[in-house]
Image: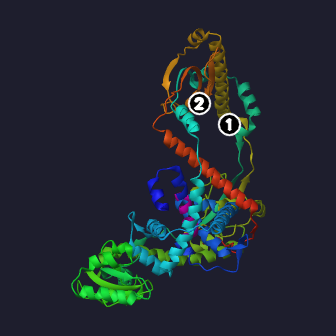
Amino acid sequence: MFFDKLRAGAQGTVSKVILILIILSFALAGVGSYVTQPTAEVAAVVNGDEIGAQALENAYRNERTRLENQLGPQFSQLLGDPQYVAQIRRSVLEQMVEQRLIDQKVQELGLYASDDQVRNAIRALPEFQQDGRFDNERYQQLLARSGMSAEQLRDSVRQDLSRQLLLNALVGSGFTLEAEAGWLDRLSRQQRDAELVRLPLADFSARVELTDDEVKAYYQQQPQQFQRPEQVKVNYLLLDANAVDASDIDEQTIEAEYQANLSNYSQPEQRKVAHIMINKDDDAEQTITAIGERLAAGESFAELAQAESDDVFSGAKGGELEWMEQGTLDPTFDQAAFALTDIGDISPVVESEFGLHLITLLDKRESKIKPLAEVRDTIAERLAQEEAANAFYEQEQRLAELAFEFPDSLDMAARELGLNVTSTDYFSAEDAPAKLQDPRVLTQAFSEELREQGMNSELIELGSNKAVVIHVTEYRPAAVRDFDEVQELAREQAVAAKAIELTEQAAVELQQAWAAGEQQAWLEQHGLTVTELEDVTRESEQDPAVLDALFAMPAPTDQPSLHGVALAGGDQVVLKLNAVSTPEAPSELLAQIRQGQSGLQGQREYLSLIGALKASADIEYRQPTLQNDNF
């Protein structure tokens, strides 16, 4: 079985590729998108099959949510760049086109996923899991809330799995010759002996002495090092509805809010039930009636659920479902479950859109109301936020009007709204004050139009109930700083550049001396020593740059194998490779290496397939009509 193979090789490269493809499919579409009805608007046409603009919009929203969770506040800043947003849309559409091409190939080949594969895939979907395990109650609730039937979900998942069957066959067909894997195996365990001399940059920095003329010459030769970016000074007014104080809300208001919304502060009645479900077919009523008679005769509900229920997920647990609240499941099922009064009571036959059920009450929790003292702070904070939000929308509109009516200053708007005008010192786009570090604000602050007209900006909405209006008061264009202003910085950089030059020159001299057999005298002259490196492997604790260079060096012949390496901090290292030892016998990693290389080959085959399908396909990209990005 397909998923059995996946479980058996869960750590392999091939299976990881397949799982990533499955995850990508659901990440793009999401469970909710399976029931989205296509619209007349079209984003692309692939061999005559249309990709709806609404489907693209759904996939784009899901991708935005994923990126926002991954990048956090940084993502909000990136959204200020229209090109970045357009790039996300293009990327999502391109993935949908590739998915459609794969679907068409699957249909052409007649691939079909089995019922067992579909069942296992549904159980593995994260949407239906709680604490890493399939949750049947969550499964039922999500289906009911989405208006989606179990059959619809099964058909959609079957389509996805059928697509994965093709990809699994393709990626799994990659192979590597045993001789190739054996060579990689031996190379991975190769050992090298060498000698190393480190030339510290600090030693050469201490020897550098530069005159003022030499420092100025460096300044003149490297003007880009002393460039001051364009800078502005601005005045701004900031509206922030999030800066609220819950202590301003009086106790009478809090009490009234509590009494008016007691239902929000109560724990509703909860019930734990078990059920036996029979799928709807010609014999369903006869089957469920027979089960009811066996229950009436005294047979165990749990045992019958395990043996007879078509809901295999709950059946394995004797039909038991998780704790439920009224109004969360199918209406007929919900009504029957809450009509049971005593533990052990069994309902009459109940028909839902999923099938025919018998329900028994296992346990119940009575409803209770949280005391005011427990929820007081939460109520006060919410009321304060609501008041601030309401005031914010009014102030926002008025600020926009005043900034337009009195365009040459923010003073009038500040007086009427009771705000303070904040003035900044000079700043560049890279070191703007924290409250102005938003691409939309910086675009306005450094716009030529705003600067030359001497007018207030438009109201800039920052999200999260924040908005700002700015007024540029002074501008300083980009220019090379005067030498007197940066003289000390120029000296530091000139000394550092000269020290690097001397260190590199010394490394070359050492290699020349080593090649001539005169390295000892040179090392004594410079007060340096040799470090012996024995049995070094690719995993040894050495600087990565040293390891990379050492294992890239040719084996020594009549001439010594020498190489210089620049380290991250500016130090130089000279290596002399003395010996290379490559094992002949294979290791226990041979099979894993071969499998890994086969997986990489499979990935290349997948990319090749996509390229071939695109090359032979008739693909028409159309401009999506849903361009509003204010979600």
Give the label, 1 or 2, closer to the camera. Answer: 2
Viewer-nearest residue: 273 or 153: 153
| Quadrant of the image containing the C terminus | bottom right
Q: Position of residue 582 (x, y in %)?
A: 53, 26
The residue drawn where x is 52% and y is 41% is 593
Counting labels gives 2
**Amino acid marked by disc 1:** Val
- According to the picture, the residue beneath numbered tag 1 turns out to be 486
Viewer-nearest residue: 411 or 282: 282
Pointer 1: residues within 10 angstroms few (<14), some, or many (20+)? some
Viewer-nearest residue: 540 or 314: 314
The residue drawn where x is 44% and y is 57% is 7
Q: Are marks 1 and 2 in contact (CB under 8 Å)?
A: no
Can I make out residue 368 in this image? yes
> In the picture provided, is 76 more to the left or to the right than 380?
right
Can I make out residue 266 in this image? no
Residue range highlighted in magenta = 19-30
Q: Position of residue 309 (x, y in %)?
A: 35, 78
- According to the picture, the residue beneath numbered tag 2 turns out to be 567
> In the picture provided, is 403 more to the left or to the right than 382?
right
Q: Measured along the vertical axis of the image, is residue 511 above or below residue 12?
A: above
- The residue sitting at the left extreme is 298
Q: Position of residue 315 (x, y in %)?
A: 34, 75
The residue drawn where x is 63% and y is 55% is 606
The residue drawn where x is 76% and y is 33% is 220
**Precedes in sequence: disc 1 or disc 2:** 1
Residue 126 magenta-drawn?
A: no
Q: Main secondary structure of the magenta part?
A: helix
Viewer-nearest residue: 223 or 3: 3
Element carrying mark 1 = helix
> In the picture provided, is 152 more to the left or to the right than 361?
right
Pointer 2: residues within 10 angstroms few (<14), some, or many (20+)? some
